Image (tube, grey):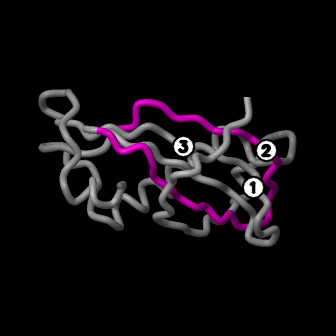
Amino acid sequence: MRFTLPEHKKFTHQMIIPIRWGDMDAMGHVNNTIYFRYLEIVRLHWLYEVGGPPDPNGSGPVIVNAFCNFLRQLEYPGDVLAKHYVTNPGRSSFDTYITLERVDDPGVIYAEGGAKTVWTDFRAQKSVPLPDWMRKLVE
């Protein structure tokens, strides 16, 4: 099933991630699990940049699902341009969507993925409303 980015999404962040030699598998392309690592890297980079990393003694973001559609093979050497979007803000959650393209092949999406992020009270282990500052970022 091919995923398509929603029309009503908000671009929030981008970064370049180098493809490492060790990211490849025996087939000579980036291993599927590494794509999820790239998605995690850009998602966490954005969260830290906006001041929203998890606080183990308080609350913070937790992903409750993650997906990735592999459209083209990434191969070493090269750099990945990861573009991060948010959409679908709810009471305690929002969705993130990320596209991955090669820097040397601009505009061509090699993979796309995302995650449902839920704001969580870690001690109570349950969802809580998004903080106002985060809601403003994702609306």
Number of marks in the rendered image = 3
Residue 15 to residue 111: above or below: below
Distance between the alpha carbons at the discs numbered 1 and 2: 7 Å
Distance between the alpha carbons at the discs numbered 3 and 1: 14 Å
Quarter containing the N terminus: top right
In the rendered image, which residue does mark 3 sit on?
Answer: 114
| The one of 73 and 23 positioned closer to us in this rendering | 73
Residue appearing at x 70%, y 39% in the figure = 69
| 76 with respect to 64 (left or right) | right
| The one of 74 and 111 positioned closer to us in this rendering | 111
| The one of 113 and 133 positioned closer to us in this rendering | 133
Q: Are marks 1 and 2 in contact (CB under 8 Å)?
A: yes
Q: Earlier in the sequence, mark 3 or mark 2?
A: 2
Residue 79 to residue 29: above or below: below
Residue appearing at x 75%, y 48% in the figure = 30
Distance between the alpha carbons at the discs numbered 3 and 2: 14 Å
Percent x, y of residue 2? 73, 35
In the rendered image, which residue does mark 2 sit on?
Answer: 71
Magenta-tinted stretch: 62-90
| 74 with respect to 82 (left or right) | right
